[in-house]
Structure formats: structure tokens, C-alpha cells
Image (spheres, grey):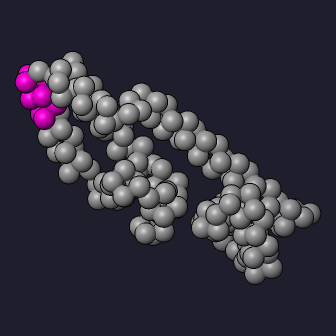
Amino acid sequence: MNYKNKDVVDKLVREHSSALVRFLTRRMKSREDAEDIAQSAYLKLYTLDNLDHLSNAKAFLFQVAANMSIDQIRREVLHKNYLDKEASKQPRDLSAMATSASQTVSLEREIEARETLLLVHAKLQGLPHNARQAFILSRNKGWTYSQIAKQMGVSVSSVEKYILEVLKQLRHVVVEVEQ
């Protein structure tokens, strides 16, 4: 860590922390996300070469934080679009699908499905605890990413990364089975 900026960053934290979090909360609609971004912005300032030459360090801090919030919003939109795309691939009426499928599915297909389910279950058990926990809380319990992040004590972006990694791993299992 670059300690040349320690005094400047510490002063910014003392003088503008609450204003920065309020500013980011309005943008992000979540205090937890705002606090995460504010923390990341302060850490980013620590890594810069020298802040003493800045004419308006507060404005620079707010601009860094605003850019980070835009990046996170973009990631969330991309993730939502991905999830919407995946959801659109699933049938809308699961009960109707189950009724018609049970009438037409052959015993062979049922065995293949059970084997696939066992492989998926085994893959889930082999994943890191945090990724598995985030995935289960999201898919099984229906929790939002913010709720999961709070429960696990991590950022929302970490929850997104965990769930995307699980989805990627499970997709590999399904692709292997289909080949």
C-alpha cells in the first residue's frame, strides 16, 4: 500500500465519508453497496502515486466512487440480462410441463436425467463453500443478492461472482452429459 497518501485519504475519510455514502446510496439504492464502493474508492486512492498535487481531492474522490458505481451497475445489468436469458430458456408452466413430460418421457430418458442430477449434485458438493452457499441461498431460498451478501458478510459483487462461477461449472456438467 502506498502510504504517501495515507494522510490525504484519512482526511477525506474523516471529512467526507458520510456524504460519500449518501451520494452513493442514492445512485445504488443500497446502503451496503454504497459502503462497499466507498471503501473501494478509498483503497484506490491509497494505491495512486501522489494525491498532494490534486486541486480538489474531494471532487476526485467522488468521481472515482461514481465511476466505480457505474461499473457495478453495468455488471448488475449484464448479470440480470444473463439470468433473464437463462430463464427464458426454461418453460413457463412447470406443472403443465411435468404432466406432459411424465406421459411421454421414456425410462431411458428418466435414467439419464437422474444420472445428470447426480453429477450436478456431485459438482455442487465439490465447489467452494461460499460459492455453494450463495447459489443455494439464491436458487433454493429465493434470497436477493443483497440479502445473501449480508448473511455471508461479503459484497454483492462477490455473491455475483460466486453464483456465476457455480452456473458456469453446472453448465459444463450439462454440456458433458449431452455430448
What secondary structure characterizes most of the magenta part?
Answer: helix
Is residue 137 left or right of 155 when viewed as pictured? left
Q: From the viewer's perspective, is residue 69 above or below residue 154?
A: above
| Image spot of residue 19 (x, y percent) | 79, 73
Point out the residue furthest to the right here. 55
Residue drawn at (55%, 41%), measured in percent from left and top?
80
**Which residues fall within the magenta stretch?**
107-115
In the rendered structure, the answer to whether residue 93 lies left or right of residue 122 reads right
Taking 118 as reference, is 2 above or below it?
below
The quadrant of the picture occupied by the N terminus is bottom right
Question: Is residue 111 magenta-colored?
Answer: yes
Q: Is residue 134 above or below residue 89?
A: below
Q: Is residue 5 magenta?
A: no
Q: Quadrant of residue 93?
A: top left
| Residue 4 point in image, percent of width and height | 71, 70
Residue 136, percent across and down? 33, 54
Between residue 66 and residue 55, name the one nearer to us: 66
Asked if residue 143 lies left or right of residue 67, the reply is left
State left or right for residue 129 relative to residue 111. Answer: right
**What residue appears at the point 44 percent right and 62 percent down from the top-left corner?**
148
Query: Camera-side residue: 126 or 61?
Result: 126
Residue at 52% in and 54% down: 157
Residue ranking furthest to the bottom: 14
Q: Residue at x 37, y 50 (%)?
A: 139
